[in-house]
Amino acid sequence: MKKLLFCVLAALCFMGSSCELIDLTLDNQEGGEGNSITFDISPCDDGEDIAIDSLPQAILDYLNGEYPNIEIEGAEVFYDMDQEIFGVKLANGLEILFDENGVIIASGDENLEVDLAIDSLLQGILDYINANFPQINIDEASIEIEYGEEFFEIDLDNGLDLFFDELGDFICQDDDGGDDDDGDDDDGDDDDEGLSLDDLPDSILDYLSEQFPGLSIEGIDVEELCGDTKVIEIELEDENEEEIKVYFSLEWDYLFMSVEVSEADLPMAVLDSLASAYPGYTLEDDDIYRWTLADGSIQYKLEVDTDQEDYDVVVDADGVIICTE
């Protein structure tokens, strides 16, 4: 796992007092020689909570042997390609990541999290917030530790939490209260975070006005697409209530436009590719979208149903499957 090194100003940094540098480097426990598993933790993505007794026996044996008197407060599982990664949180603040065989990938002590003075933040973080959230104030700043990975966490007064790496580069944003009624967006992806018009930079408002005149903004969310890519989704609607969705990266780079289409609109190359990859498949009629990317190329986002599994699939116009989930 990539190790982040923070050397930051202490939180209690007041006028007239000196500001000491704090080194919050943690030593990850590696799983011994031959362990080449890496897994990047995102502070915006939670694992799936699981029962403690459902952990692999090798993990339970390790915890019972090394921490016999420490309560296990929680367990979760992350899915990374074809492997399962298990996270365990102990009552003493220790967090440990294991692979399926009980080999430790990384660990860290969440008790080492600290609050920071806002005026001690890296200039790159302040510049990002001023550019993307010019009317939003910073409520709190801190260092968050997730299984040994360290992040700057910035809480804004609009409810958004922003996360940055040790260099001050933006990673992701999170909002605990941003779900819609059913927790699902119309493109079939999880509805993770809600945003408002106040969160849109003036440059984005100008872009939408120029590119989509006569359309009104009906909703703004942060969505997770196939492949665990988080994007900003802006739902537009015309006077006839026809919907268009426009997608941007979390840094507000334009990505693509999405419109709903029918199965009859799909190119034969796409249909042939689906038939080869998913014999006997069917498509959900209300979950077929055509994406027009920034470079003009076309992709399709589909929900493919089979007798065994249902899949979210992204495929290009030539039938090349780009992502399956």
Image (spheres, grey):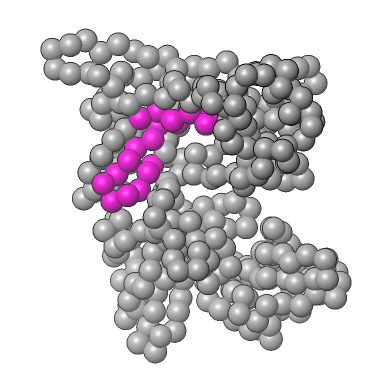
> Which segment did they paint magenta?
142-162
State yes or no: residue 144 in magenta: yes
Instruction: Choose between 156 and 233: the one closer to the eye.
Output: 156
Residue 11 percent location from the top left of the image: 28, 22
Instruction: Choose between 3 and 14: the one closer to the eye.
Output: 14
Residue 162 percent location from the top left of the image: 38, 42
Q: Residue furthest bottom?
A: 240
Name the residue located 62 percent from the left edge and 47 percent from the top edge. Answer: 48
Residue 230 percent location from the top left of the image: 51, 52
Name the residue located 58 percent from the left edge and 68 percent from the top edge. Answer: 188
State which quadrant residue 33 falls in. Answer: top right
Instruction: Choose between 171 and 157: the one closer to the eye.
Output: 157
Q: Main secondary structure of the magenta part?
A: strand
State which quadrant residue 118 falls in. Answer: top left
Judge from the rendering whether residue 143 lies leftward or rightward of residue 50; answer left or right.
left
State yes or no: residue 194 in magenta: no
Judge from the rendering whether residue 134 lies leftward or rightward of residue 16; answer left or right.
right
Name the residue located 68 percent from the left edge and 78 percent from the top edge. Answer: 284
Q: Is residue 215 above or below residue 37?
A: below
One can see residue 159 in this view: yes
State which quadrant residue 287 falls in. Answer: bottom right
Q: Residue furthest front?
A: 69
Judge from the rendering whether residue 312 lies leftward or rightward of residue 181; answer left or right.
right
- Quarter containing the C terminus: bottom right
